[in-house]
Amino acid sequence: MQLTKREFLKTSVAIGTSLSALSFLNAQDHEKETEKKAETPPQLKNTSFSWVRGFNYQPGYGSGSGGYEDGTGWSIWHDLKIDIIERELSRGKELFPEMTAVRLWLPYNVYLAQPKKFLEDFSKFIDVVGKVKLRAMIVLFNAWHGQPDFGGFSQSHFPSLTKEQLDTTFKFVNDILDRHGEDERIYAWDLCNEPDLGVSLDLYYSWLKQLHDRIKLRKEKTALTIGSCAGLKATKKYEPLSDILGIHPYFTHRKPDNYSQNPKDYDDKVAGYKNHHDNYVKFANEVNKPIIASEIGWGDLIDVKRIDSLQVELSSVNERKIGWMIHALCHSPVADLHHPEYGPVRKPGYMACIEPDGSLRPGHEIIRNFLKQ
């Protein structure tokens, strides 16, 4: 069929309009796909410890005196109550069936006072961990200080220690590893909890390196880490001493009551927080190592405020395949894990997930959803 000039022009315009519309739609689709890719966070490549999802744990008893000694490593371990520990860990597993792991700080000062009993008690603890079908990260030394002071191996006292005293720290580690160095119920050893709090000393790093090197000389299949709260710079610093990069990425910004009226400020803080996680993942992928957020879960005396923080933190680590352990499982006289009537409450607020009577803290059932993801 032969077209007239007018018909040809009409047909050409129609075809051109259709092609323009198609190009516009394709451009929109491409833009949406680009936005979708931009929203997808970088994924951790080494996921060998992404199965770790659990809690830090400190037993919910103290000396019973009600005094300052309550909530210290000494009050818990000097007279270990293994029946309470088994009950609390069993309850944790009942309330959070998908939890896989716990993290525990050891009290070096109790070992110095009664080494034989301490080692026997530690073995009892590991037996309970296995009995309730969990695995443990064990923190050998602690540099963090709260109120009450859990007790630890502080940098401030470090320069005054004698060679004999430093050698005793190595003996402490050897004695523990002689019993449990090949124990599959322990999936990792944390050399020191938050060693960069306060002044960073080269001497302290040198000691941590000696700990690392001595453990590796034993030729056991031990994964080592260092739980640091000092950001990516510290993570890079401790990477040579870590088979697993240990981070403590607390989201410390509380969601305001008037959030709906002005969401941008809070949303910007959430975006910045998740960007920090992106940077952790990028670095981990560069060195081909896994990451565990070995402390997460900023606290609050108000349950819903604590839930707000948990949702931001847990969604961020799950999206990036980072393993995690919430601080902490249950109510305890240890600093930051109790209601005000049990002792001082500091800036982190109340960080426990199970109440003193063994019930689940209100709203904390949302943790189960993140455990299942």
Image (tube, helix red, strand yellow):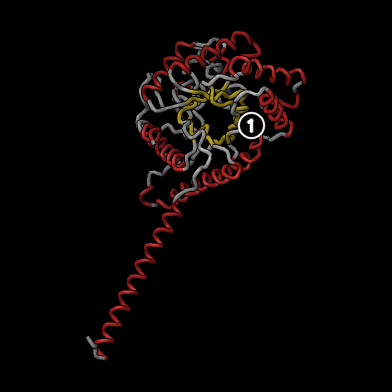
**Rendering coords of residue 228 (x, y %):** 59, 34
Left or right placement of residue 75 versus residue 238 in this view = left
Left or right placement of residue 9 versus residue 353 in this view = left
Residue 300, image quadrant:
top left
Amino acid on which the number 1 mark rests in the picture: Pro
Q: Is residue 291 above or below residue 178?
A: below
| Viewer-closest of 342 and 49 | 49
> What residue sits 39% from the left and 28% below the top?
98
Farthest-out residue, left = 1
Residue 165, visible in the rendered structure: yes
**Rendering coords of residue 141 (x, y %):** 62, 24
Which quadrant does the N terminus fall into? bottom left
Residue 215, image quadrant:
top right
How packed mark 1 is, by other alpha carbons closer than 10 Å (few <14, some 14-19, many 20 or more), is many
**Rendering coords of residue 281 (x, y %):** 54, 44
Total marks drawn?
1
Farthest-out residue, bottom = 5
Farthest-out residue, right = 163
At numbered mark 1, what does the secondary structure look like: helix, strand or loop? loop
> What residue sits 40% from the left and 51% below the top?
263
| Viewer-closest of 11 and 84 | 11
Residue 144, visible in the rendered structure: no
**Rendering coords of residue 256 (x, y %):** 41, 44
Q: Label 1: which residue?
A: 195
Which quadrant does the C terminus fall into? top left
Left or right placement of residue 231 versus residue 369 in this view = right
Residue 92, image quadrant:
top left
> What residue sits 74% from the left and 31% below the top?
203
